[in-house]
Image: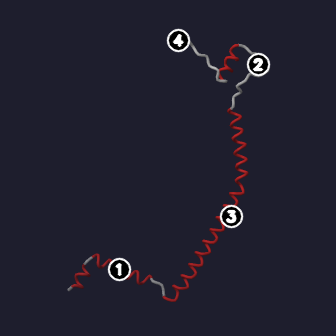
Amino acid sequence: MSDQRHNQNAAWRATQQWKARVDSSRPAPGAGGLKMLFTWLLFGAMLIVGTVLGLFFLIVGWALLPLLRHRMKKHAEQVRASQAQYAGGSADEPEDADTSRRHRVLEGEYEVRGPR
């Protein structure tokens, strides 16, 4: 009677089907060991190749750092030069009141006004 109840239960039937699938998918005892050995050897070889490639790219990156630093330094100098403004007057520019006042303000000389 208990077998009939178990056979009618959907969860029990699903469990039995799952057990049957697991049992049928297990490999033969002799072939599993050889397959496992080749799998571990392949996995180990992939780990070694990955480590060697990683070290290679690390060394190449370290070797290229001075070149990159030099290039970035030159670029920073160009940016600084393009953003710099000349604060002093030039020799061919006439010294009138506007230009001298403008240069004095750029150099940080400010005029203090009296109270209003």
Q: Earlier in the sequence, mark 4 or mark 2?
A: 2
Q: CA distance from mark 2 to mark 1?
A: 97 Å
What residue is pinned by disc 4? 115
Q: Dot 3, how many residues are within 10 Å of its Cα: few (below 14), some (14-19), or many (20+)?
A: few
Q: Amino acid at mark 3?
A: Phe
Q: Position of residue 38 (x, y in %)?
A: 58, 81
Q: Nearer the viewer, mark 3 or mark 1?
A: 3
Give the left or right position of residue 10, taking residue 82 as reference: left
Which mark, by number, is residue 93?
Answer: 2
Q: Colour scheme in the image?
A: secondary structure
Q: Earlier in the sequence, mark 4 or mark 1?
A: 1
Can you say whether 46 is above or below 3 in the image?
above
Q: Position of residue 113 (x, y in %)?
A: 57, 13
Residue displayed at 70% across by 53% down? 65
Which mark, by number, is residue 79?
Answer: none
Q: CA distance from mark 4 to mark 2?
A: 36 Å
Q: Quadrant of residue 112?
A: top right
Q: Circles 4 and 1: CB distance less than 8 Å?
A: no
What residue is pinned by disc 3? 56
The one nearer the camera, 46 or 80, is 80
What residue is pinned by disc 1? 17
Q: CA distance from mark 3 to mark 1?
A: 51 Å
Give the left or right position of residue 4, taking residue 37 as reference: left
Can you say whether 99 is above or below 8 in the image?
above
